[in-house]
Amino acid sequence: ALAPGAAPAARAAEATVLFQEKRVSVAVPGDWRRQEAPAAAGQIPAVAYLSPRGASFNAVLAYTPVRGDFTSLGSFGTIKDVEKFILPDNVNGRMISAKATRSNKAYVFDYVVEAPGAPVRHLKTLFALVPQNKATDIPSIISLTAQVLESDFNSGVEATMDGILDSFSFTD
């Protein structure tokens, strides 16, 4: 296994690169690059995976610390409750689908958002909880979001977005 942020291991048969991040792994197309965002002390940095097609096509892995008594996604309510967090009423957009996956250990949302003065974006977000397994672990909500401009959304892009989310796995 690779250390977080270490050089990726290529899986040539699938033309992807597998990144071992903090407690999870994610595979992206082999020509995408990884960029880590600065994080506050004691926090896990967010990681962006950037397509060579431009900044509008990317994926972001983000960690949000939660209390240690949050032990399952049910701690946040139903999938409908989490859907309202992903796409709140004050955001102009529409939810295309919301489903539980990975034996109810993750939710996947497919949605479109339009911010005033910005182009419409198509997003797919995987929302999962990584509990505290060891005293040194930080229990966290992990979101993996792939996004592209809606005008660039097509079957090839959708397959790439789905592949990124499908590649997500826990490493511990």
Image (cartoon, rainbow, N blue to C red):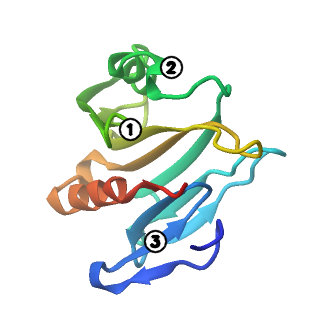
Side (left or right) of 116 relative to 129? left
Horizontal arrangement in the rendering, residue 70 relative to residue 51 (left or right): right
User: Going from the N terminus, do you reach mark 2 or mark 1 first?
Assistant: 2
Residue 152 position within the rendered picture, expressed as x and y whole percent measured from the top left: 25, 55
Q: Amino acid at mark 3?
A: Leu
Q: Is residue 29 above or below residue 36?
A: below
Residue 75 is labelled as: 2
Q: Quadrant of the C terminus?
A: bottom right
Which numbered circle lies on residue 106?
1
Farthest residue toward the right? Answer: 41
Residue 114 drawn at (x, y percent): 36, 31
* Residue at the image position 57 percent from the left and 45 percent from the top: 62
Please identify, in this view, whether the residue under mark 3 or under mark 2 is nearer the observer. Answer: 2
Q: Name which residue lies at 55% across and 28% down.
A: 71
At 35% from the left and 53% from the top, the residue drawn is 165
The alpha-carbon separation of the residues under discs 2 and 1 comes to 13 Å
